Image (cartoon, rainbow, N blue to C red):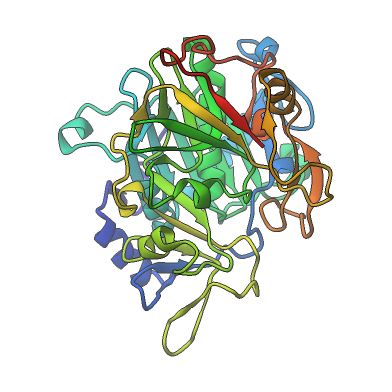
């Protein structure tokens, strides 16, 4: 990857430096609470129909091809990649080196290259930041290049629109363009982990996690917007992570180092921990602010219902750092049942839990995905179908290794 023709490469800037740079470049404004406020433009949610996997002989038989995992021909990828690199010439670039995975045995070294300073702040807050001594020997296991200003040509590139998220699982490279929604970056790494970790006996999970006073772990599975972040940020329990975890022989671990909270109708009374976490260093996406006072209006959905706040997990008091824990004792399935199919709360048997986990009945919520303007009933096995490239669904390596004398409690 040649970036030598870039105007300036900024590597691993601090939070304050990135905020200053984003403001100087006119990428956002400061809210009265100190958060950096940005807007996404055309795409204010994920674009699952614009995600592709390069169809290479080394991975072809391992991929569950279909509407979720669409193939891209290798020659189309090379052409797209070449034009993207040409677009980045003479542009300032921002580089973040860090990790995905709080368990050192399974963590993935990552490098994320951004066209926008605010997106580099986003990834700094969302992923695991290395200690200074770890940077000198950092070698990325996966690289993401995100250039929202570069648009694909559907006729030339085989894409569905100008937006694209392309995973090359042979070259450990992800290309993102045509959209500035930062959630595409975090979910692209999650997709890579869903491909890599089952091969090492780790079950990737789309869930949040927290700990009780006795060290009892609970998992909250659900699609975006179903309440994973809100429910896991419990003042009576310690947060492990709000969205993505792995389950190994030893227990669970957070994939990320930050939270990505949906903040439509956010209030200090109902979600005090998330409210307090929105301060200097936090990125607010698509939140309306008063022109004079710069006070955030969390009730307004003038831009989208999918307003978001991105902040480091340590902004939540008493968060578990590093985000590792033993095996969970309670598993909760969250569903946005917009059509009254399920009871409000149900205690499940082991067999029922297996069925509902694999069927994953729920609803997509307005704004979380491109084109979704009202709840849509859907089935998402393991609450993570959109992020699972592999052909065969994996099972937790630790499914029979529970704490002595305990059994998981499953709740819908």
At x 43%, y 31%, the residue is: 217
Residue 79 locus on image (x, y percent): 63, 34
Residue 184's place in the image compared with 81, above or below, is below
Q: Residue farthest to the bottom?
A: 292
Residue 227's place in the image compared with 205, above or below, is below
- Of residues 56 and 76, the one nearer the viewer is 56
Which quadrant holds the C terminus? Answer: top right
Determine which quarter of the picture holds residue 399: top right
At x 17%, y 38%, the residue is: 132
Residue 356's place in the image compared with 273, above or below, is above
Which quadrant holds the N terminus? Answer: top left
Residue 331 locus on image (x, y percent): 56, 30
At x 25%, y 61%, the residue is: 16
Residue 346 locus on image (x, y percent): 70, 37
Q: Residue farthest to the front?
A: 405
Is residue 391 among the parts visible in the rendering? yes
Q: How many marks?
A: 0
Residue 389 locus on image (x, y percent): 64, 24
In the visual, does 328 lie left or right of 393? left
- Of residues 315 and 11, the one nearer the viewer is 315
Is residue 86 among the parts visible in the rendering? no
């Amino acid at each position: 990857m040649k970036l030598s023709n870039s105007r300036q490469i900024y590597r691993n800037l601090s939070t304050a430096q990135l905020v200053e740079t984003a403001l100087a470049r006119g990428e956002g404004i400061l809210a009265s609470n100190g958060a950096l406020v940005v807007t996404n433009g055309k795409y204010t949610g994920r674009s699952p129909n614009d995600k592709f996997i390069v169809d290479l002989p080394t991975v072809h038989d391992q991929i569950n091809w279909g509407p979720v995992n669409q193939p891209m021909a290798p020659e189309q990828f090379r052409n797209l990649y070449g034009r993207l690199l040409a677009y980045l010439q003479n542009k300032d670039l921002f580089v973040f080196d860090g990790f995905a995975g709080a368990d050192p045995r399974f963590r993935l070294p990552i490098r994320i290259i951004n066209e926008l300073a605010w997106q580099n702040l986003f990834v700094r807050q969302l992923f695991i930041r290395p200690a200074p001594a770890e940077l000198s020997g950092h070698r990325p296991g996966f690289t993401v290049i995100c250039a929202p200003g570069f648009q694909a040509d559907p006729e030339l590139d085989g894409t569905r629109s100008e937006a694209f998220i392309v995973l090359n699982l042979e070259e450990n490279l992800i290309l993102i363009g045509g959209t500035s929604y930062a959630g595409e970056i975090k979910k692209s790494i999650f997709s890579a982990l869903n491909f890599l970790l089952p091969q090492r006996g780790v079950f990737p999970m789309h869930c949040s996690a927290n700990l009780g006073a006795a060290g009892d772990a609970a998992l909250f599975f659900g699609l975006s917007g179903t309440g994973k972040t809100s429910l896991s940020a419990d003042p009576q329990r310690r947060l492990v992570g709000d969205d993505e975890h792995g389950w190994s022989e030893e227990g669970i671990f957070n994939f990320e180092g930050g939270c990505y909270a949906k903040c439509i109708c956010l209030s200090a009374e109902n979600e005090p921990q998330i409210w307090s976490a929105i301060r200097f260093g936090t990125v607010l996406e698509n939140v309306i602010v008063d022109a004079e006072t710069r006070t955030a209006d969390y009730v307004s959905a003038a831009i989208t219902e999918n307003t978001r706040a991105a902040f480091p997990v340590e902004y939540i008091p008493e968060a578990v750092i590093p985000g590792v824990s033993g095996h969970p004792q309670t598993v909760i399935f969250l569903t946005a049942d917009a059509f009254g199919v399920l009871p409000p709360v149900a205690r499940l048997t082991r067999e029922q839990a297996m069925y509902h986990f694999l069927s994953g009945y729920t609803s997509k919520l307005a704004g979380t995905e491109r084109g979704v303007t009202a709840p849509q009933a859907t089935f998402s096995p393991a609450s993570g179908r959109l992020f699972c490239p592999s052909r065969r669904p994996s099972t937790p390596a630790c499914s029979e290794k529970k704490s002595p004398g305990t059994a998981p409690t499953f709740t819908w």
